[in-house]
Amino acid sequence: MKHLIDIKDLSVEEIDELIEVAKDIIKNPDKYSKKCEGKILATLFFEPSTRTRLSFESAMLRLGGNVLGFSEANSSSTAKGESVSDTIRVVGEYSDIIVMRHPKEGAPVVAAEKSIVPIINAGDGGHNHPTQTLTDLLTIKCEKGRFDNLTIGLCGDLKFGRTVHSLISAMVRYPKVKFILISPEELKIPSYIKKEVLDKNKIEYIETQNIEEYMNKLDILYMTRVQKERFFNEADYIRLKDSYILDEEKIINSKKDLCIMHPLPRVNEISVKIDNNPKACYFKQAKYGKFIRMALILKLLEEC
Ligand code: NCD
């Protein structure tokens, strides 16, 4: 049985296969509309979500399957003190595959140890978010046509932003990928990622606080929200939340084919005035999320 806890659980070849299936689903949705008939996907969300939960549910429904679950910890027996392991053990009896989001880093690993069905990590604290990365990879493939030879600017909360951590882990496997890491001093990428992912793979990267400094070099600009829920101190959040606000002026020197991405939700970090700029890819990105999740469900349920 296969789980998806970390993006590295998938090889480069498996990612290519998922992307090909997702592209085929986009072209021929009818071919897939009954593939998961009789199967049930459970979504256990101990933390808020819009896109991840609803795109998983939509994905399963579009495959002809059914869904059940909860969208806040307080409406489940967690509020009575039940452990994640016990919840997972039981929900495995009611479903064929489980998608879970949890505020504790590592919770999906514990869940996978006890689970009798495949577990998909839909975000664990400030750690990882592999299915957002699959969404990002499908977006990059469709919008840029390649994974190699890209200069990627990652901007905002690089400390707590789990989507950034998983995306870096995925992209270091492709040749000639460089990163420009743009963040305030307090929200720099964690040192374990620098040592174990970037340095270990001999990846070129630059850290800066200035979003415009390398704008003309970027193929992708990946904006992120300052992760309010991970701060211990509200005053720090208030001080840092508007560190970057991307607007038309800041992208004046960017490449013609710059692709601006954001996992969403956006708070204030991208001006709505950019939404109709051809460089803005974030709403397309959210759309791709459903298709790659359909491909992932099929793979983990061994239906294709
Ligand atoms: C992200 C997350 O949950 O980490 N959202 C998402 O899944 N699309 C990013 C965020 O919440 O800022």
Image (tube, rainbow, N blue to C red):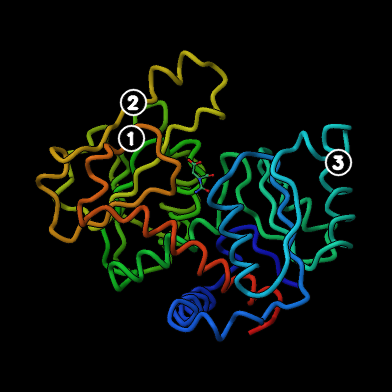
Q: Are marks 1 and 2 in contact (CB under 8 Å)?
A: yes
Reply above or below: 166 against 78.
below
Give the mark toward the camera: 1 or 3. Answer: 1
Q: Going from the N terminus, do you reach mark 1 or mark 2 first?
A: 2
Reply above or below: 1 against 122.
below
Determine whether the residue tagged by mark 2 lies in a helix, strand or loop: loop
Q: Which residue is mark 3?
A: 83
Q: Are marks 1 and 3 in contact (CB under 8 Å)?
A: no
Tell me where residue 252 appears, x and y as whole percent: 10, 44
Q: Which residue corresponds to the image point at 76% horizontal and 67% vertical from the top-left?
A: 40
Q: Which residue corresponds to the image point at 40% horizontal and 58% vertical from the top-left?
A: 285
Q: Which residue is mark 2?
A: 242
**Residue 63, quarter of the rendered image:** bottom right
Quarter of the rendering occupied by the N terminus = bottom right
Tell me where residue 242 appears, x and y as whole percent: 33, 25
Indicate which disc residue 31 carries.
none
Q: CA distance from mark 3 to mark 2?
A: 37 Å
Q: Which residue is mark 1?
A: 269
Instruction: Name the residue type under label 2.
Output: Asp
Q: Going from the N terminus, do you reach mark 3 or mark 2 first?
A: 3
Instruction: Name the residue type under label 3.
Output: Ser
Does ligand 1 reach within 8 Å of label 1's beta carbon?
Answer: no
Disc 3 crowd rating (10 Å Cα; few below 14, some 14-19, many 20+) is: few
Query: On the picture, is 115 further left or further right than 62?
Result: right
